[in-house]
Structures are given as structure tokens and as C-alpha cells.
Image (spheres, coloured by chain):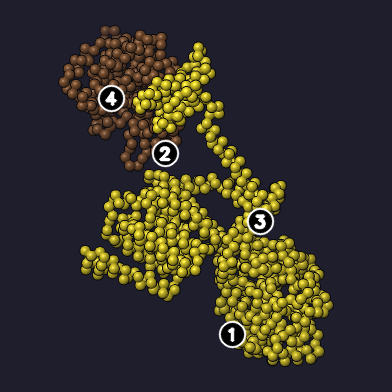
Chain colours: A brown, B yellow
Amino acid sequence: MNDAPFLPAIHRVIDQVGTVILGKRSQVRLAIACLLARGHLLIEDVPGVGKTTLAHAIAKSLGLDFHRIQFTSDLLPNDILGVSVFDMNAQTFAFHPGPIFAQLILADEINRATPKTQSALLEAMEEHQVTIEGATRRLPEPFFVIATQNPSHQIGTFDLPESQLDRFLMRIRLGYPDAEAERALLAGAERRTMIDDLPACMDVAGLVSLQTRVRSVFVADALIDYVQALLAHTRRAADLANGLSPRAGLALLNGARAWALIDGRNHVEPEDVQAILPSVAGHRLHGQALGGAVPGQELAERLLAEVAVP
Amino acid sequence: MIAATASPQVPWLREALWCAVIVPLVAAPLLADAPHALLVLGSALAFWRAFVIGRRSIGARQHDAVLPVSLHSNWMLLASLAVVLAPHAWRLPPWLTLLVGLLVGWRIAVMRRRLQPPPRALLVAMVSAASAGIFLQYGTLFGREPGVALLSVMIALKLLELKSRRDATVLAFLAYFLVITNFLYSQTLPTALLMLVAVVMVTATMIGFHQRQPAFRQTTALAAQLLAQSIPLMVVLFVFFPRLPGPLWGLPRDGGQGVTGLSDSMSPGSLSQLSASADVAFRVEFVGPVPRTADLYWRGPVFWEFDGRIWSPGGAPPGQAAAPVVRAISEPIAYTVTLEPHFERWLLALDMPSALPPEARATSDFALLANAPVRTRVRYEGRAALDYRANENETEANLRRALQLPAGLNPRSLALAAGLRDAGLEPQQVIERLLARFRNEPFFYTTNPPLLGSEHTVDQFLFESRRGFCEHYASAFTFLMRAAGVPARVVTGYQGGVVNPVGNYLVVRQAEAHAWSEVWLSGRGWVRVDPTAAVSPLRVESGIAASIAIDDPLPMLVRGSLPMLSRAGFAMDAIANAWNQWVLSYNTQRQQQLLRNLGIDADDWKVLSVMLLAGAAAATLLATLLALRGVIPGRRDPSVAAWERLCGKLARAGLVRLPSEGPTAYARRVADVRPDLAEPVRQIADAYVRLRYQPPDPQRPAAALAGDLRRRVRQLKI
């Protein structure tokens, strides 16, 4: 493989984040794969399981310019995007960029903000640009959003609409650590100081080069058949409210490419698709069972079990 | 309820008191032989008692054991069985209807957690008891009635044994079979529609078996859709499936039980009985306009012999199978008759038949006979001359037969006839004298004549009662003609008919049965004389409804007094007729005719079966190929074949690859379970992945890799 120098770096990133977020190796790896596939990441879980810490650790390890926005119900779009302020000296309006102008945004507790503010983030995520007072401004490259959210049944939350959920390439859940990891966490150093001390394992150029590399990972016809079979199955299934969109199909392929690249392969295998599918499809699938909704994650796993590898 | 307040703690006492109320309710109509409806009411009360008021509730776990399919499916199954069993409820003997009803009620009580299903021993006992009862009832377990009875009871018992989804499926299939048994009794359009509903319901039930939470509308819609999709196949099978001549279950005892119609003899009262029946005897389509009602004499059996009370055909004299000769004077009228089955051989024909349908032969007295008793609805074409000369040269033997009289009976009539004969009158004058006598003396035409004694019936009628139906007049007139020396005979059949304006055809009902006389006049042959016309001209000119006194019994459909009713009646009869013409009378001959028109020369059903089988095989093959086109790739990848061979080998060793398992994951699992196979299987999986998922490598052509893969798979020893 011709970009050998960066691959070990990516593994170092995964290992390093793993020292901070204990026992969550596969989630860390999924998060990295998501960023390599140029997707945005949604982390959903109850407060206090390390969502923010994970985002922080990733930003530090990748050496990215990092802003954190704490979403609250009174946060306004301009608080994110920035404002123009009249400069007395220069007699002109000067633009003061908001926290969105960074390579990695941590949108903390995104579902506490009002829909208006949420949708301000939407344009930025999809277009990699923002429009403020009529002027369109490019966002830095690379541009990631890692959003965290509390499960929507908690008090004081605004559910993300489906259209906005669809902008996130993956959604992962952290879950409680197992007993061993929790013991290490309780006994270990304070996380904040650990993060502050984390060195950057790679630079921006390396990351962009890897992102480009992901796009060229080979996808065979047989694999496209498999992805198509998965998509078709969701559209046929009687217990699903709606099938996966073509955008979800692209997300599946790109996610699987990134996963394969992390594995050091230049081609995608069905196992790659299977590894990322629960995270990619979980937040896009909704059951239509009458009694109690089936979690999307479970629907995704059922989907994998039901579709044969061609 | 006294019992409820007196002893709420003793459920069995209450049950017993309830039984004391219900059992007489159920048993009374049974003893009085009252209609089944009362009986059903009684058993309905009993169910209500059993499952609405009962207090005992069965634990949920036990309950689930008796509900292998969802509660909804249970109800659907019961409802479909009810639809297919309902028509049988009126055909089974009362005790069987009651038993089936009670068993179904028990099942409902089980479903509502009010009762436990019966223990196995009780079930076995009930099966044997019911079989024995049916055997005692019918004397056999085979045939239509006992078969249906057995099936109904066994289905009801099976309901109580419903423990697995398989049992439920068996019941659904039995319900399909019950649909067929209904057609053994009735093939009318209402039956067909009811059974169509039943088929949709059973199909919906079966769909529901495979759903966790079936919804009525959804399953029914899907079932209806399935049936709609099968219509083309149904049409093809209807048209091309070999028709067997005659009924498939030609059990003689099924034939003609309780069928009304003309009989092979005529006695006073035999035709007036028919006047109470609104059953359709036959329907006629005329090619041209319908003739006047007064000309519509439908010829049936002809009677020669009289024993003083009963007219019968009498044996034809030996060597006298002379073919009848009819000389048509007026232009013959062409028509098509659709005759309802009457289980006798004669075919009704418009007087006088001038040409024979190919499937019939004529007797020497111009009655048309089919080759076999008419067991199914038949259609035949006829031609008739309204003005004719029939057997102008009759044989001596026949003329002698037409003069025979029972010795020593009816002296007063003989004396009357002798007076006419001795007056030296021409036969034509004798006829007129006698008809004038009927016209002028106080004779009455009625469906409800007084009973005649056993001996001098003609005397009694002519000189005393003077009230009679057509058979009395025909009999008396023929008797007098013979006594006066003019050869005469009695012809029975139907007279008239009502034109159905909706379908533009003529309906002739049993109530229009009629009898008249024929006399032989030298130079003119057999001439029809209808003495009834002399008594009641309206009968012949306007039909029976106009001629019968309003207080005489006559079926409502025949009388047609309510215009609304008769219009609806015409429409319904037109629909029934279309059903008969297009669906039911599609028989062997019409099938062969159609096939011949299509250029297929299939003489018997064996050729047709082979053709149909070949066609079905070809269609199935085609459909399979079409269905599999998306599943099986057109060009089978050799690497996939090799991989599947490996999977097959490993599967035989107990390592079945899950359909969703990719090659690398599978190889890893195999390595975990069988470390000895780890290396070769990993190599094969790698080679397979290289061929299938990796970009083509210019250094290592795919063909070489595939050959390598195949070799490795072949060499793998497990």
C-alpha cells in the first residue's frame, strides 16, 4: 500500500484514544472510520459515559483545530455561525466568525437546542459552508461534526428530525463500561488532564491524504450486489416504516471503505459492510410494529441476518 | 336468577340449574321434529351460558398452549368454518347439527378461557361415538350424506384438539375441502358466491397463521388479491380441464330424491300436486318470436293404457317400433331447451316435433327420449311444426291400443259414449259434443279437486264432483272418446310458460304441468284436443296464474301478482339462467366443440389430460425460469461454484455457513472449531476473496486463480 506512513498513524490514534476511553475499542474505531469517510458522527447515550471525552480525545490525537459548542435551548444560530459587528475605527462591518469555523466541531447535547439552531448546523454539515448575512463563507477543510445527544426521552430535548439524522454518517452508542474498564477508569488519572497531555499522532495533511485514499478503495461488483440486496431488503420488509435511501447506500459503501482501509486492505469485503451497518443504518431505520418501537440497532442486526451474502 | 343468588360458591350447581333450563329448550324441538333453526337457537343459548357467564378462567400459560396461532386467526378459522358448515347445518340430521354446534361452542369457550379443552380420552370417545352414530343413522359411512356428516363432526372435534400450528393448517385445508362438498348439493350462483367468500376467508386465515399480529383487512385484501391473480389459471382450467361425462359420484341413491316433475304415469291428483311447485322445469330460447301461449304445448310422456284410475304408457306391441311420421304444414319453429335434471329419460319438446335433436330418439307416439336419465342440466335444440299431420297412416296395432278400455268400469260414461256413437255422429262431431258438454255444464277448473273413489273415477268426476284439474279432464275425455270408438290417448307435458323480458327466454315451471288428449282421425292423423281449454279457456290462453281461483294454492312466483316481486324474480332467473348456460352446462360436448373450433382435435379426456399436463408443465417451467432469473445469475461464476462446494463440504462436517456469513468470517469460525482445517480453509477463503472482491491483478489472471481455487477445494479432505 502506497500510503504506508499514515496507516500506522491511524492505528496509533485509535490506540491513544483507547487509553482515554477504556474498553470501547470498536466504537473508537467506528468513530475514526466515520471521520475517514468524511462523515459526521452522532454519539448517543445517557450523560456521563464519555461522549464528550471521546470527541475531545479524537480531536487532540488527530491534531485538529477544535471547537466545542454546548447546545442549550437558548442558543441562537448566530451564536454558532458568527456575527458582523460595526468597527468604529475602520467604519465598516467586520465579521466575527463563530465557533463553527474549526476543523472539528463538538456539538454537545445537540438535541437540547431548538430546531432553528439545529438547522443552522445542518447547512454547515452538508455544504461545508455557511451563509451569514447574504455572504457565503467556506468552512475549513477537513470539517467534521461530532455531535452528542441524550436519548430523546429525556426531559428538555428536541428530537432531531429524520432529515437531520440522515446527515450523520454513523450513530454510535457508548454504553456503560464493563467492570474491568470501569475499575481502571476509577483508579486511573483524571481524564481532562490526560486529554490535555495527549500528543497529536498525525497532521491534517496526513488525514486528508487518508480521506482521499478511502475514496479509491476498490469495490467489486459482488460487493455492490450485496449492498443492493441489503437496501432492497429494507424497502421490501413489512416491519420497516421506510427503506434505506440511496444516500444511506453511499454511506454504507464509504463507511465500509474506511473500515477496510483501517484494516489495511485496499478492497472491501462483506464483513466490512457488516461491521459498520448497525452504526450506519441504525438511526435511519424505524420499525412500524404496533406495540413498542424496536430499536434501530436491532432492526439493522436483523437485516444483516436476513440478507445472504451473494 | 335464583341460582346465582342462592349459591354463588357452587358453580356446578348453577351449571346444573342452567342445564335444566337449556336442555328442554334444545330437546323440545328435537322431539317435536321442529325446524333446525329452533335447535340452533337452543344451542346458541347453551354456548352463551358456557362462555359468557362462566367464571372460571384458565391460566395464561395453559391458555397459550391451546392457542398455537393468534387469537385473531382462531376467530378467522372459526368464521370460515362457520361459512362452509352453515349450508350443511340444514342438511345434517338434527342431532349432528346440535353436536357440531356444541363442539364449536366448546372451542369458543376454550378460546375465551372459560373452559379447558377436553382430555384426550374424551376426544377419542367422542370420535368413536360420533362415527357409530353416523353409521346407525345412514347404515354406511360412505356416500355423500354420511361423508359430509363424518367430515363435519371430525372438523368440530379437531377444533378441540387444536394444539399446534399444524393442526390449524389441517383445519384450514379441511375447510377448503368442505367448500367442495357444498357443491355436491347445490351448484347455483348463490352457493358459488358464498363459497367464494369462504375461500377468501380460509385463505386469509392461512395468511394470518404466519403473522404475529394479523389484521383482518390486510389478510383479507391479500387473500382476495391472491385469488384474483389465480383467475387466469382458473379460466384455463375451467375451459380445458377434461370434463367427465356424467357426475363423478354417480351413486344411484343420490339420484332424484325429492325432485318434482312429471312421472311415468298419471292418476287423479298427480298433476295438481305439481301446481304447488314453483321449480323451473326448463327454459326455452326461440330463434324467432315466441309463439302464442295457446300454442305452447310441451310434449312429454304419452299414455295409452288405463286401468280405471291410472294412465300408463303400456308396453308397445311387439314389432311396432315404427318411426313416427310428421308432415309439417306450417314453417317449423326452431328453439333451444335447457332442461333441468328430472332423473327420467324424456325430453320436453314443443308440439309437434318435426326434427330430432341428435342426442335423442323419438318413440312411435312422438315423445322424445334421451339415451339415459337426465341427471344433469341438458341443452338441446328442437324444431316444431305448429300445424302438422302426425302419423296419418297409423298401424292397426296402435289404433287397437288406443281403443282399449278397462272392463266393467264407469258404466254411466260408457252409456254416454255409446249414445253418441249410436247417433251416427262423425268423430269430429263427437269431439265437439263432448267439449260443449264440458263448456256448458257446471264444470270447474281447480288445483284443489275433491278426492275421487277408487272404482268408477270417471263416472264420479263426470256426473258428481265436476271439479278437476287438467288430468281429470284429459282422462275423462280420452275415456269417452275411446268408448265412442275414436282412438285416443293422453299426452302429458307442460302448457304455456312465462317470457322473461330480462333474458328474453321462456321459463316453464312445474306448476305449468298439463295433460291433454290426442285423437286419431282418419285422414288427419293424431289431432290434439285439450278439454281443459273448453272448461277454462284462460288456462290455455293466458297461463295457469290467470285461470286458478285466487284462494286456490299456487306459488307466489307463479302467480306473479306483485309486479315488483315478479320483476326481481325475472332478473334473478335471468342471472340463474346465464350461470346455467355459461358455467354449469359447459359439458363434454361443448368442450369438444370449443376445442375443435380452436383447432384442437381432442376426442377423449385422456388426450386432453395429456395436453393439459404438458401445458401445465411448460407453464410451470416458464414461470420458474422467470422467477429465478433474478436469483440465479445468468453466467455462473466458477469461483462462486467452487466456494459453494467448499461450504457444502464443511456443512456435511457440521459447519454450516450462515447465509449472511462472509468468506473471511466463515474461515475464521471454521478455524476456531477445527484448527486442523484452519490453514487450507483460510487459503481458499483468501483466494475466493481475491477473485471476488479484490481488483483484478494483471500479474495473476482470474482464470488461473479460479483454477487454483477449484483445485484447492477439490483437494480439501475433511
The residue at the point 41 percent across, 74 percent down is: B31
Amino acid at pointer 2: Ala
Q: Toward which corner of the image does residue B503 lie, by quadrant?
A: bottom right
**Label 3 is found on which chain of the structure?**
B
Amino acid at pointer 1: Leu
**Label 1 is found on which chain of the structure?**
B
Q: Position of residue B8 (x, y in %)?
A: 22, 64
- Tell me, yes or no, whether dots 3 and 4 are on the same chain: no
Q: In the picture shown, does residue B522 fall above or below A134?
A: below
Find the distance from the CA under tag 4 to the CA under tag 2.
Answer: 31 Å
Q: Residue tagged by mark 2?
A: A238
Q: Toward which corner of the image does residue B125 lie, by quadrant?
A: bottom left
The residue at the point 33 percent across, 42 percent down is: A291
Disc 2 residue crowd, few under 14, some 14–19, many 20+, Cα 10 Å: few
Do the residues bearing badges 3 and 2 touch, measured as CB atoms within 8 Å? no
- Tell me, yes or no, whether dots 3 and 1 are on the same chain: yes
Do the residues bearing badges 3 and 1 touch, measured as CB atoms within 8 Å? no
Tell me the element at label 1.
loop
Q: Position of residue B638 (x, y in %)?
A: 52, 24
Tell me the element at label 3.
helix
Q: Earlier in the sequence, mark 4 or mark 2?
A: 4
Find the distance from the CA under tag 3 to the CA under tag 4.
Answer: 78 Å
Q: Position of residue B535 (x, y in %)?
A: 67, 81
The residue at the point 38 percent across, 44 percent down is: B212
Find the distance from the CA under tag 3 to the CA under tag 2.
Answer: 47 Å
Q: Residue tagged by mark 3?
A: B588
Q: Which mark is residue B451?
A: 1
Q: Nearer the viewer, mark 1 or mark 4?
A: 1
Q: Residue tagged by mark 4?
A: A148
Asked whether, in this view, residue A109 is left or right of residue A129, the answer is: left
